[in-house]
Amino acid sequence: MKPFIVIAALTLLATAPARSQALVDPNKVAPEYREAAEKRRAEQLRQRECALKADLEKVLPRDRTAFLNHCLDMMAAKQ
């Protein structure tokens, strides 16, 4: 049993942490896809800003989706 615990601990320590999706860099895509990449980056920045607001306001996980949708709708309405 002890070797199993040691192997399990080593496996957990050796795994890489999961990363969130990286921001799209419009300069690293082909010119014909640059406009789409710029739109995607703008959307990602809006989503991150709303997620930060949710974290700062300590929104409960069960209410987070509704909060984020409302935040994104309000940002779209401002534009």
Image: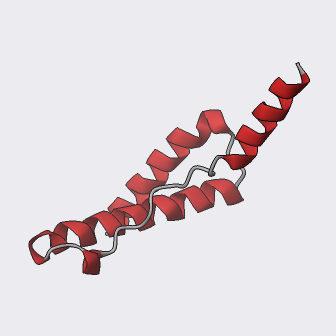
Q: Quadrant of residue 63?
A: top right
Question: Where residue 77 sits: x, y (%)?
Answer: 34, 61
Q: Picture coordinates of residue 12 (x, y %)? A: 73, 40
Q: Closest to the observer: 25 or 67? A: 25
State the residue at coordinates (35%, 62%).
Answer: 43
**Who's the residue at 35% across and 68% down the image?**
24
Q: Residue at x 54, y 46 (%)?
A: 67
In screen coordinates, is 35 left or right of 67? left
**Quadrant where the image shows the N terminus:** top right
* Relative vertical location of residue 65 with respect to residue 41 in this rendering, above or below: above
Towards the viewer: 43 or 37: 37
Place of residue 49 in the rendered image (x, y in percent of width and height, measured from the top left):
52, 65
| Residue beneath the point at 77% across and 41% down | 10
**Colour scheme shown:** secondary structure
Left/right placement of residue 10 relative to residue 28 reads right
Q: Is residue 59 above or below residue 6?
A: below
Which quadrant holds the C terminus? bottom left
Query: Which residue in the rendered view is the most extreme toward the bottom?
Result: 27
Q: How many marks?
A: 0
Residue 21 falls in image quadrant = bottom left
| Closest to the observer, 29 or 46 | 29
Residue farthest front in this picture: 3
